[in-house]
Image (tube, rainbow, N blue to C red):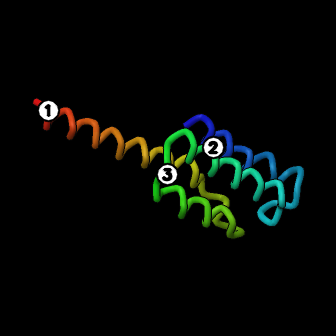
């Protein structure tokens, strides 16, 4: 979750001040890196694909997509864990 928040803050606050904004190669490299690291840490989830594609479109970059995707993955994994625990009982 911290990685997603840091990536979104960088893209919303820092990168527009020092690079070309949404059309920046640094922004694209950050998105590729974050997608790879999140897939490595959390496994592949379909929530990451729309977030990755949305971050590549100018203007949509203003939405914290990585944070929302990780929160959604966490919410779903928590729900699955509760259901699994209930089935064991």
What residue would you read off at disc 3?
44
**Residue 26, position as x, y percentages in the image:** 82, 54
What residue would you read off at disc 2?
37
Could you tell me which residue is drawn at 28 percent across and 37 percent down? 81
Could you tell me which residue is drawn at 83 percent across and 61 percent down? 24
75 versus 20 height, above or below: above
Answer with mark 1 or mark 3, whichever residue precedes in sequence.
3
Secondary structure found at label 3: loop
Could you tell me which residue is drawn at 87 percent across and 61 percent down? 20
What quarter of the picture does the C terminus occupy? Answer: top left
What residue would you read off at disc 1?
88
Side of 52 where 74 appears, left or right: left
Front residue of this view, candidates 55 and 62 = 55
**Residue 21, position as x, y percentages in the image:** 81, 60
Front residue of this view, candidates 60 and 77 = 77
Side of 82 where 32 appears, left or right: right
User: In the rendered structure, are the residues bearing label 3 and label 2 in contact, judged by CB atoms less than 8 Å apart?
Assistant: no
Q: Dot 1 surroundings within 10 Å: few (below 14), some, or many (20 or more)?
A: few
Side of 3 where 20 appears, left or right: right
- Most distant residue in the left direction: 89
Q: CA distance from mark 1 to mark 3?
A: 26 Å
**Residue 11, position as x, y percentages in the image:** 73, 51
Secondary structure found at label 2: helix
Answer with mark 3 or mark 2, whichever residue precedes in sequence.
2
Task: Report the number of discs.
Answer: 3
Could you tell me which residue is drawn at 20 percent across and 32 percent down? 85
What quarter of the picture does the N terminus occupy? Answer: top right
Answer with mark 2 or mark 1, whichever residue precedes in sequence.
2
Q: CA distance from mark 3 to mark 2?
A: 10 Å
Secondary structure found at label 1: helix
State the image quarter where residue 2 is shown. Answer: top right
Q: Dot 3 surroundings within 10 Å: few (below 14), some, or many (20 or more)?
A: some
């Amino acid at each position: 979750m911290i990685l997603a928040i840091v990536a979104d803050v960088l893209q919303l606050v820092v990168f527009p001040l020092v690079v070309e904004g949404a059309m920046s190669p640094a922004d694209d490299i950050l998105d590729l890196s974050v997608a790879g690291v999140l897939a490595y840490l959390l496994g592949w989830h379909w929530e990451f694909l729309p977030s990755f594609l949305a971050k590549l479109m100018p203007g949509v970059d203003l939405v914290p997509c990585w944070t929302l995707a990780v929160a959604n993955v966490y919410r779903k994994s928590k729900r699955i864990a509760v259901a699994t625990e209930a089935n064991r009982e």
